[in-house]
Structures are given as structure tokens and as C-alpha cells.
Image: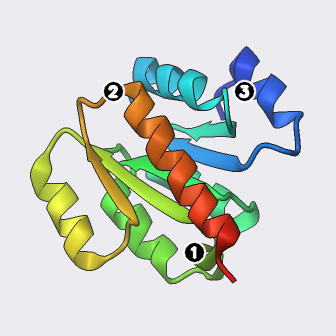
Amino acid sequence: MPPLLKRERLMAENPQNPRVLLVEDEEDLRELFAEVLGTRFSVETACNGGVALARLQNEAFALLITDLQLPIMGGSELLRRFQTMPARQQTAVVAISANPQPLARVARAGTADQTLRKPFRATELVRCAMRLVSEGASAP
């Protein structure tokens, strides 16, 4: 597992912040998204779907944000497998991609609560994450 960014370590120490698993293979984007989300969430990262699936099987997260085009196990396959896991009921999901076709397939399959097409503003990602986590927290 890649080392945690300084901001991720600081946010992970605060149990008040909802846990987010961010899955992105492009290191620069992963670091940027983690930094932006780290102002409100405890962000942990994975660089492919296989690593993310192992984390999801053993840890609880309020939100999963995954790119759909990943090495080893793609984001669509990750979401398909995660859909059948008990943890999915407590975890909101955002799928991101620059390619509209995989986003449309995920939306049709219902394996993500929200989709975002790259490029998007960092503030849009934060607003989306905050809304989904807030909705999850208020669910019965």
C-alpha cells in the first residue's frame, strides 16, 4: 500500500471525519483528490480495484470513490463485486471517469450512487461526497 500523504495521516487521526476510500491509479490525481477531500474526510487510497476490494472486505468506509479505468481490476468490476457485499448497504459510491460509456453502464447497472465525468472541479467532488455521506448518515 502506498504511504499515506501527510494530510491523510492527520485526517485519519480524527475519528469525527467519515472514512473515504479513494481508488485512482494516476498518482497525481489520487494525491490531488485526497488533499481536497482531506479537508472534510479521513481519506485512504488504493491504486487499483484489487487492492480496493481487499480493503472493502476488511474495513468500513462511509464513501467509496473509484475511477472506472484501473489496472488489475477495473472500477466497473470492483463495483459489481462490491454490490453483493454487506458493507455496500452502509457505503455510498461515486464512480468517476473521463469516458462517458463506462459511466453510463455503471448508472444503468445501479452500482454507483453518483457518477462524475472527468474533468470536474475539485469543489464538485467535495460537494458530491458531502451530500452522499450526509444522506447516508440521515438514513434510518
Q: Are marks 2 and 3 in contact (CB under 8 Å)?
A: no
Residue 69 pos. (x, y %): 28, 45
Q: Residue beneath label 3, please?
A: 8
Residue 101 in view: yes
Q: Determine whether the residue tagged by mark 3 lies in a helix, strand or loop.
A: helix
The Cα–Cα distance between marks 2 and 3, rounded to whole angstroms, is 20 Å
Tell me the tag on residue 88: 1
Q: Residue at x 64, y 82 (%)?
A: 86
Q: Give me the disc on residue 41.
A: none
Under circle 1, the secondary element is helix
Q: Earlier in the sequence, mark 2 or mark 3?
A: 3
Provide the residue designation for mark 2.
Answer: 121
Give the CA distance from mark 1 to mark 3: 23 Å
| Alpha-carbon span between mark 2 and mark 1 | 26 Å
Residue in the picture at 50% in, 83% down: 84
Do the residues bearing badges 2 and 1 touch, measured as CB atoms within 8 Å?
Answer: no
Q: Is residue 26 left or right of residue 37?
A: left
Going by the numbered disc 2, the residue's amino acid type is Arg
In terms of sequence position, does the residue under pointer 1 or pointer 3 come before the other? 3
Spot occupied by residue 11 in the image (x, y as percentages of width and height): 79, 30
Depicted 132 relative to depicted 39: above or below: below
